[in-house]
Amino acid sequence: MPTFQELLTSWASKLTDYESQEAESLVSWLLEHHLGWKRTDILNKADEASFPQKIFEDFERLKTGEPIQYIFGKGPFYGRNFFVSPATLIPRNETEELVHLIINENKRAGLKILDIGTGTGCIPISLALEMNSPEVYGMDISEEALRIAKQNADELDAKVIFSKCDILTEIPEVAEIDILVSNPPYIPEQEKSGMHKNVLDFEPSLALFVSIDDPLIFYRRIAEIGKQLLKPNGKLYFEINEKYGNAVASLMHYLGYADVRVLKDLNEKERMVVGRI
């Protein structure tokens, strides 16, 4: 009978779409989810015959490249678990850094915050729970994403007002805001060929891709709207494609934003742009 470590290594070798370390992490997550297995159990014997059938079914889905968060229906973000679905992007570490930045830079109570392209609601919900009595709004074009976001807000007891909005054709009905934040679609379509299949085949294209003809379309539109919606000294926070830091900053300068900063994430990639009215 193999040990858990031997089982983990064996199963991870079958996840051929992933690097070995990532594959082992996914299998470890799977075992912990279904069996309560921890790294401290690494030398224990693993009797596959006693495993529930669901663990094998989920492992087959993993082998197709389906993200484990979609398999479980949840993913972690900023210390909490959020419901996810194929209609929402999976919350990512880079976005946690954006949330952390906003929290650290804005300590005043009662700030009015709008998140555009909210997806799971992970950004506005985290801000609602971590900041000092904010008034928080989240908008998305996808009704299914908004359903998931509302479910997350209810589950986590966060006060966020969600509404549907096509930001390219509509102006949000939320004025006099202190903070506007967005993680919009920012991957040019021609980059699809270099992307991992677990993103390309499973995550929503609507939330990922923009035309190479105008890759800054969402940044331009949201920054223009920000000029109308933000209070004096209000701040705009973007998560960005690492290739477009200077372009987004130049766009914001052109539109009249002050104190524009391009910030790197923990991997030293330019991932955030910030400015104020």
Image: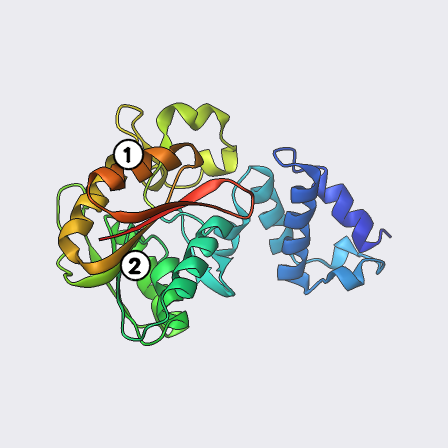
Q: Residue at x 78, y 48 (%)?
A: 7
The residue pinned by badge 2 equals 147
The number of callouts visible is 2
Q: Residue at x 75, y 48 (%)?
A: 8
Q: In the shown orientation, is residue 249 left or right of residue 44?
A: left
Number of residues whose C-alpha sits closer than 10 Å to that of mark 2, classed few (under 14), some (14–19) or many (20 or more)? some
Task: Name the foreground residue: 89 vs 136.
Answer: 136
Q: Position of residue 124 (x, y in %)?
A: 34, 62
Q: The disc labelled 2 sits on which kind of residue?
A: Arg
Q: Position of residue 165 (x, y in %)?
A: 18, 51
Distance in Å between CA atoms under marks 1 and 2: 27 Å
Q: Position of residue 154 (x, y in %)?
A: 35, 71
Q: In the shown orientation, is residue 103 left or right of residue 150?
A: right
Image quadrant where residue 187 sits: top left
Number of residues whose C-alpha sits closer than 10 Å to that of mark 1, classed few (under 14), some (14–19) or many (20 or more)? many
Q: Is residue 201 visible?
A: no
The residue pinned by badge 1 equals 216
Q: Residue at x 76, y 55 (%)?
A: 49
* In the image, residue 243 above or below residue 131: above
Image quadrant where residue 244 sits: top left
Task: Name the foreground residue: 183 vs 100.
Answer: 100
Q: Residue at x 60, y 39 (%)?
A: 63
**Sequence order check, earlier mark of 1 and 2:** 2
Task: Name the foreground residue: 221 vs 7.
Answer: 221
Q: Nearer the viewer, mark 1 or mark 2?
A: 1
Image quadrant where residue 103 sits: bottom left
- For the residue labelled by badge 2, is the local secondary structure a helix, a strand or a loop? helix
Task: Name the foreground residue: 214 vs 71.
Answer: 214
- For the residue labelled by badge 1, is the local secondary structure a helix, a strand or a loop? loop
Q: The disc labelled 1 sits on which kind of residue?
A: Leu
Q: Position of residue 151 (x, y in %)?
A: 35, 65
